[in-house]
C-alpha cells in the first residue's frame, strides 16, 4: 500500500503533504501542550514558582522592591497616557486598549500596599516615634541601661571563669 489515498480510505492513518500521520491522538497532543522542542507544556512544577521569603527580607530589600514596583507603575501610566493622547483612535477603543494596563496598575498598587505593610511591620515601634517624644527618650534610656547591665553580667561571668581557671592551675 504505497498509495496515500488508499491509506485514507482505510481510516488507519491520514496523509498530509505526503507525510503519514496517525488519526489517533498522541500522548503529547492530548495534553494540549506543544512538543518538547518548544519547551512549552501546560503542566508546571510547583517548585518552579518563584516564592519570596518575606520573613527573612531586610527593610532595604523591601525598599528596593517598592522602587521597582513604582517604576513599573510609571511605565504603565506612560503607556496609558500615550494611548489616550492618540487622536485617531475612538474613545471606546482607547478604553479597550487601556484596560490591560489598568489591570496591571491595580496589581502593582496591591503589591506596593502589601510591601509597605510588610516594611511597617518590620520597623520596631519605638523607631516610628518622634525623637523628641518623652516616651521615646525614656524607652531608649531603658534599652541602654538593660544593654549595659547585660554587658556587665557577661564581663563578671568572664572574669569569674578566668579566676576559677587561675585557682585551678595553682
Image (spheres, grey):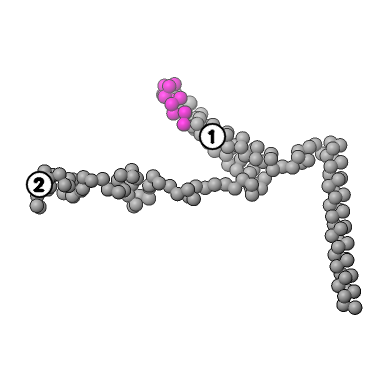
Q: Name the residue: 60% across, 43% down.
A: 65
Tell me if residue 117 comes above or below residue 84 in the rendering. below
Please name the residue shown 61% across and 45% down the image: 54
- 96, above or below 15, in the image: above
**Quarter holding residue 110:** top right
Residue 63, given in percent of the width and then of the height, sits at 64, 43
When the figure is inspected, residue 2 is found, relative to residue 93, above or below; the finding is below
Q: Is residue 21 left or right of residue 131?
A: left
Residue farthest to the bottom? 170
Residue 31: percent from left, percent from top = 33, 45
Compare residues 97 and 110 and report the one nearer the observer.
Answer: 110
Q: Which residues make up the magenta segment?
A: 88-100
SS under mark 2: helix
Left or right of residue 13: residue 152: right
Q: Camera-side residue: 21 or 26?
A: 26
Q: Which residue is mark 1?
A: 107
Distance between mark 2 and mark 1 Cα atoms: 58 Å
Observer-nearest residue: 151 or 79? 151
Residue 72 location, quadrant: top right
Mark 2 vs 1: CB contact within 8 A: no
**Residue depicted at 44% across the width and 28% down the height:** 97
Please give the residue where the numbered disc 2 appears in the rendered image: 6
Q: Secondary structure at mark 1?
A: helix
Amino acid at each position: 500500500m504505497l498509495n496515500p489515498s488508499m491509506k485514507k480510505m482505510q481510516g488507519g492513518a491520514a496523509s498530509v503533504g505526503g507525510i503519514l500521520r496517525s488519526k489517533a491522538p498522541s500522548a503529547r497532543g492530548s495534553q494540549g501542550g506543544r512538543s518538547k522542542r518548544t519547551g512549552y507544556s501546560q503542566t508546571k512544577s510547583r517548585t518552579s514558582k518563584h516564592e519570596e521569603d518575606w520573613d527573612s527580607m531586610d527593610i532595604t530589600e523591601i525598599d528596593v522592591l517598592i522602587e521597582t514596583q513604582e517604576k513599573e507603575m510609571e511605565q504603565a501610566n506612560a503607556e496609558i497616557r500615550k494611548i489616550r493622547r492618540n487622536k485617531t483612535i475612538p474613545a471606546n477603543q482607547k478604553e479597550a486598549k487601556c484596560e490591560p494596563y489598568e489591570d496591571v496598575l491595580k496589581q502593582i498598587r496591591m503589591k506596593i500596599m502589601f510591601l509597605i505593610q510588610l516594611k511597617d511591620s518590620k520597623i520596631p515601634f519605638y523607631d516610628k516615634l518622634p525623637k523628641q517624644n518623652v516616651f521615646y527618650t525614656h524607652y531608649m534610656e531603658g534599652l541602654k541601661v538593660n544593654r549595659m547591665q547585660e554587658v556587665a553580667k557577661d564581663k563578671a561571668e568572664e572574669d569569674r571563669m578566668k579566676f576559677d581557671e587561675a585557682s585551678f592551675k595553682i
